[in-house]
């Protein structure tokens, strides 16, 4: 489902009596999230990311603008009618409910349009197939677990559900035959009896439908007298709910924790339960608000991979809000960088990193961050301090500029020509980190207090003290000293 946002604006009214001005949290915001992709909404605290997400969800109403899901204008639709799944940073699970009940919760009282199915036939055929092909395994599972009293009947059912991807009530039916309690001919007799019952149930359903002039097609859908599928608007049955909970639990890999309470799970597992709860209704759109920020570093990495996998497997259009650039870069098909309610740049993560359009975006992406120098343009030449860096046709007027150079943008190896080494830096510390080496340098022209960080090949010979460096043209960006917008160099 494509999401399209046109001229979205949200202004929170201030309070003139208390001298609190209006706050425009989101300002004329436009984006398109293509169907099946993951968009990372990235920006510093207070830039309007959450407000944008809440407007997409319907929890907040825009002051102006439109939100479209596919060809449906949802701008004024209530949240529950939008078909969204929401995940917050603080999971918000119900502590007194089991994981199973937490995931199930959104499905209770849900009215859905369904095609009428010959469910008794489907269930009977499923069991017949299991008895035909997996009888030994079923008997063994039943014997080992229940009759050795190792696990409860419901835990056994769960095991069957897990192994054969069936609903709990079918597992209970199979258990009720008690096939593991008898052997040899006795078991054969019990089995025949069970099969006869199942076949009778299939025949009975067919007969009952035929009496009404209905029939069943090869997908086990019920057809009316005209051969058309019958659709009905109704609540989900217990089995349908069970199947959806089990399917979603498997997808997010929490199927082994369904009996536990949230307090018996790790943070990462709890967050997966929250994701399952958001997905169980098969929403059109998944909205995630800083879903990883309560997790420790290791779990954050793992859960982020999980979210990516789940998103790819389901193909669900997703908007992911974060202030962590690394997180957004690693997970997103496209990122949007926001500042004070305004979209600064939008593109594939690597493209935004390679080609930032402003000093703000350049500084926001990259770890270690970009190095920023105060520079100037004089008569078509770029200077950092007194050092001439390069000439370019784009340097039309004399002005102050910022020069951003990525940590990997410096060269000082023996193949670099001396005349290309244009920038002097005072190397203060050298740390070798395997293949790479990190140089910490000072410069009188650096912008702000942060020292310059350079990453180069650890084979390169460089010593502490003043060294001269060449600059890789693709790793250097020049920004206007006032507007902080990029001055694009010409070939
Ligand atoms: P964070 O990463 O800290 O969650 P954010 O980018 O999600 O930040 P928002 O929560 O969208 O930012 O807030 C954007 C701006 O709107 C902020 O300046 C905030 O103070 C303001 N704001 C948010 N909600 C309200 C409100 N109900 N009333 C007034 N101002 C609000």
Image: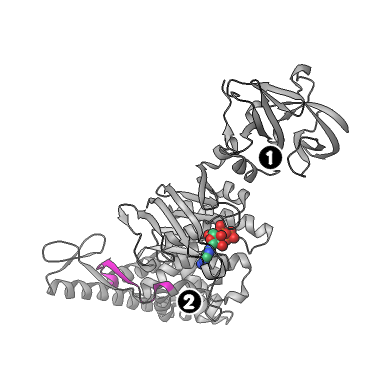
In the picture, the disc for residue 101 is: 2
Pointer 1 local density, CA inside 10 Å: few below 14, some 14–19, many at least 20 = many
In the picture, the disc for residue 54 is: none
Horizontal side of residue 319 vs 403, given as left or right = left
- Ligand 1's image quarter is bottom right
Query: Looking at the image, is 171 positioned above or below residue 394?
Result: below
Q: Secondary structure at mark 2?
A: helix
Circle 2 or circle 1, nearest the eye: 1
Q: Position of residue 3 (x, y in %)?
A: 39, 52
Q: Name the residue at 58% across, 20% down.
A: 393
Viewer-proximal residue among 88 and 311: 88
Quadrant containing the C terminus is top right
Residue, disc 1: 370
Q: Secondary structure at mark 1?
A: loop
Horizontal side of residue 306 vs 388, given as left or right = left
Q: Name the residue at 77% across, 38% down.
A: 452
């Amino acid at each position: 489902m494509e999401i399209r946002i046109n001229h979205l604006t949200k202004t929170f009214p201030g309070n003139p009596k208390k001298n609190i001005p209006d706050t425009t949290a989101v300002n004329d915001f436009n984006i398109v999230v293509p169907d099946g992709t993951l968009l990372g909404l990235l920006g510093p605290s207070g830039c309007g990311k959450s407000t944008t997400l809440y407007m997409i969800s319907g929890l907040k109403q825009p002051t102006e603008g439109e939100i479209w899901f596919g060809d449906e204008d949802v701008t004024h639709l209530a949240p529950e009618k939008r078909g969204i799944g929401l995940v917050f940073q603080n999971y918000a699970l119900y502590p007194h409910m089991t994981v199973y009940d937490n995931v199930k919760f959104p499905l209770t009282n849900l009215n859905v349009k369904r095609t009428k199915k010959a469910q008794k036939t489907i269930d009977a055929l499923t069991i017949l197939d299991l008895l035909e092909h997996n009888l030994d395994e079923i008997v063994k599972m039943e014997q080992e677990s229940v009759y050795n009293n190792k696990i409860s009947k419901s835990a056994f059912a769960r095991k069957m559900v897990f192994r054969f991807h069936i609903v709990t009530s079918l597992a209970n039916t199979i258990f009720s035959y008690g096939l593991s309690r008898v052997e040899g001919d006795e078991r054969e007799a019990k089995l025949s009896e069970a099969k006869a019952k199942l076949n009778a149930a299939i025949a009975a359903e067919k007969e009952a439908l035929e009496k009404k002039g209905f029939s069943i097609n090869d997908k086990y859908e019920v057809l009316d007298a005209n051969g058309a599928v019958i659709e009905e608007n109704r609540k989900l049955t217990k089995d349908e709910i069970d199947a959806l909970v089990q399917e979603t639990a498997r997808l997010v890999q929490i199927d082994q924790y369904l009996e536990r309470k949230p307090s018996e799970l790790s943070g990462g597992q709890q967050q997966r339960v929250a994701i399952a709860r958001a997905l169980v209704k098969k929403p059109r759109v998944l909205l995630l608000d800083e879903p990883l920020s309560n997790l420790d570093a290791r779990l954050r990495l793992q859960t982020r991979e999980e979210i990516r996998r789940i998103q790819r497997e389901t193909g669900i259009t997703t908007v992911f809000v974060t202030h962590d650039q690394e997180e957004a870069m690693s997970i997103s098909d496209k990122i949007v960088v926001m500042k004070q309610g305004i979209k600064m740049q939008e593109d594939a993560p690597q493209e935004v990193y390679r080609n930032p359009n402003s000093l703000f975006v350049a500084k926001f992406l990259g770890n270690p961050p970009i190095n920023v120098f105060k520079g100037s343009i004089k008569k078509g030449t770029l200077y950092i301090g007194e050092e001439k860096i390069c000439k370019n046709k784009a340097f039309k007027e004399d002005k102050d500029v910022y020069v951003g150079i990525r940590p990997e943008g410096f060269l000082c190896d023996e193949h670099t020509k001396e005349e290309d080494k244009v920038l002097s830096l005072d190397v203060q510390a050298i740390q070798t980190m395997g293949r790479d080496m990190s140089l910490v340098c000072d410069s009188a022209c650096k912008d702000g207090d942060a020292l310059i960080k350079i990453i180069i090949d650890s084979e390169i010979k460089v010593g502490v003290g003043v060294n001269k460096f060449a600059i890789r043209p693709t790793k250097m960006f020049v920004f206007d000293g006032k507007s902080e917008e990029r001055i694009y160099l010409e070939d």
